Amino acid sequence: MGEMSAGAPGSDVDLRLSLLVDVSGSVNDTEYALMMTGFASAFENSAVHAAIGRGDIGAIAVNMVQFASLTQEVIDWTLVDDAVSANALAAILRSTPNAGLDAPGPSTGIGNGIGASAATFPGSPFSSDRNIIDVSGDGVTSVGTPAATARDNALAGGITTINGIVISDDDGEILAHYEDEVIGGANAFATSAATFEDFEQEILRKILAEITGRRLGSFPIPAVIRQAHLMLVRNGYQDINSRLFRLRAGERGPGPETLPGEVYRAPLSDKGGKGGMAKGGQELLGPPTTTWKRWEVFGSVGYFTSEVDEQAIVPGQVFVPGFDVDAINGTVGIEYDVNRNWSLGAAVVGSDGEADIDGGSDIDIQDLGLAVYASYFRADAFNAMGAPADFWADLLYGYNSGEYDTKRVTVGGLANGSTDTSSHLVEFNAGLNISNGSVIHGPYAGLAFMDGEVDAFTETGPGAVSYPEVDIESTVSTLGYQVSFPMETARGKVVPQVRAAWEHEFEDGPVTVAGLALGEPDEDVAVFGAGLLWQFHPDAYAVLDYEGRFGDISESHGVVLRVGAVF
C-alpha cells in the first residue's frame, strides 16, 4: 500500500466518507480556499493517519461532492490507507477548484447535495459497513429537495450517518437547522466553526470523530501524561509546603526579641523544664540553652488519588477519556536558619503511581524532583483586626523529571511506549498569622508558574503510533484563609488547622497534540485542607495533613504524614 489507488470492485474499507461541500453564492473565493485548506490539513495530520491505521482494516475511502443549486462530484472515490495516500489526497483537495455551481437567486440546495452524495455510494469501488456523508455549509436550505426529505431517503438507502459542520457565528439558527433537518443516523452530530478561519481546527476534530466512531483514540495519551505530571508535581510540593504548617500555626519562633543563647527552634513548652519570658513579654520556646538549633531535617510519605472526567470534544464522540491517578509520594529535606528571619531549604520529592484510562489503557509513572526554597518570617510584623500578626513568605524552585510507560489498548492488542517528562516550577506564597487568644488565623496567597514538556515518542506493537512533543504550561494563583487552634496537652502541643482556598488557572486553553485540541484543564478549583501538628518532643514533631481539590473536570485528594527534627 502507499500509492493512490482506485481499488478493486468490492474492496473492503473501514469507512466510506463523502465530503459534501457548500459552494453557493454566500461562499466567496477566500472562504472556499479556507475550506479546502482545512480538509487538506486534516488529511495531512498525523492524528488522522493514526486513526485510519487503527481501524480493523486500516483503510478508508473518500470522495467529495460540491453543491449549490446544482451538484457535482469533484473527487472520485479514493483509497486512503496510510500517510502517503492521505497526503496525496490532501494535495488533490488543495488543488480542487470551485465547480461554479452557483446560480442567480437562492442557491443553497442542501437536500440536492445529500441526494447527489448518496447516489455516489452504489457505484463506489469500495464497500463498508459504515457510510457517512459529511455536510459543510454556511446557510440553510433555500432551494431544491427539502434537506429532511433527502436525509430520510439517504438513510433508508443504506447511508449509516449524516453529520454536519456549520460555518457561522449567528445565534445558532443555522446549527439548529442542521440538527433538525440535515443530520441523522447512528451517532449523528452537528458542530460549528465561528468563522472560515476556524474551520480547519473543527473539521480535523470532525473527521477524526467520523474515522474512529466511539473507539478510544490514541492521541489522548500525551494529554493524560501532561495532566498527570502537573497534578503529581503540585501534590509533591504539598509535602514541602506542609513545613509551612508550623509558620501558619505560629510555631516558628519567639521573633526578633529573642535573647542571645536562647533556643530558636523548640516547642512552646517542654515536659521537663519551665518556660520563661523573653523581652516584650513573649513566651520562650523552651529553657535557655547555649545552643541555637539552626538545622531541621524532615521527611514525609503520602498518598495521592485523582479522578478526571471524560471530555467529549465533539458531541457524541469521545476523544479525551476519563482517567484515574493513584500514587505514593515521599519527601526528604533539610532546612537551615540563616538568622531569626531567614531560612534556606532543599528537598528531594518522588512519586510512584499509575494512571488508569477508561477503556483499559494505563500508564506507569515514576517522577522525581529537586526543590530549593527560601523562607522569610517576621513576628508581630503588623497589627491586623486589632491583634498582632506575623508575616511569612516563601519562594520555591523545583525541577522535576518523570518516566511514563504507556500500555494502550488497540484493535490488535497492546501498543507499548515510554516517554520522559521534565518541568520547572517557580512558586511564591505569603500570608499572615493573626493571634486572637487561643486562635491563630490569617489569609494566604500564592502564584505558581510551571513550564515543561512531554517528550516525543513512538510506540511498539499492534497499532503503534508516533507522538509529537507536548508542552506543559501552567500559571496558577491561590487565595485562601487558614485557622489554627494551638492546644497544650500532657503529651505535647497539638495544633489542629483548617483552610480553604480558591485556585485559578490562567493557562486555560485546550491541551493540543499535533494541532488537535484534547480537553481543557479546570479553570477554577476549590481547595479544602485540614491537618494536625503534634509537637511530641522538644526537638521533634509530626504533621498529618489532608488536601482536597474540586473542579468541574477533576477531583483529587492527598494525604501526607510528615515528621521533622531540629538539631
Image: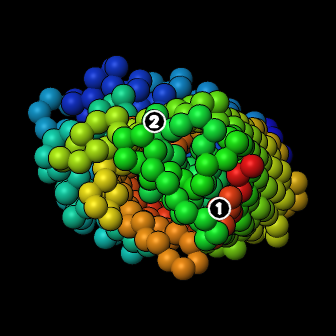
- 2 or 1: tag closer to the N-terminus: 2
Q: Secondary structure at mark 2?
A: loop
Judge left or right: residue 71 versus residue 254.
Answer: left
| Residue in the image at 38% along x and 63% along y | 484
| Residue in the image at 82% along x and 70% along y | 413
| Residue in the image at 59% along x and 34% along y | 260
- Farthest-out residue, bottom: 490
Judge left or right: residue 78 versus residue 279.
Answer: right
Q: Nearer the viewer, mark 2 or mark 1?
A: 2
Q: Residue tagged by mark 1?
A: 538
Q: Is residue 15 above or below residue 458?
A: below
- Farthest-out residue, top: 30
Q: Position of residue 386 (x, y in %)?
A: 17, 47
Foreground: 405 or 284? 284
Q: Identify residue type, mark 1.
A: Pro
Q: Is residue 364 above or below residue 342?
A: below
Q: Residue tagged by mark 2?
A: 257
Q: Which mark is residue 430?
A: none
Foreground: 81 or 272? 272
Foreground: 242 or 336? 336
Q: Position of residue 92 (x, y in %)?
A: 59, 29
Q: Kindly tell me whether residue 157 is visible in this rendering.
A: no
Q: CA distance from mark 2 to mark 1?
A: 21 Å
Q: Identify residue type, mark 2.
A: Glu
Q: Position of residue 409 (x, y in %)?
A: 74, 68
Q: Quadrant of residue 136?
A: top left
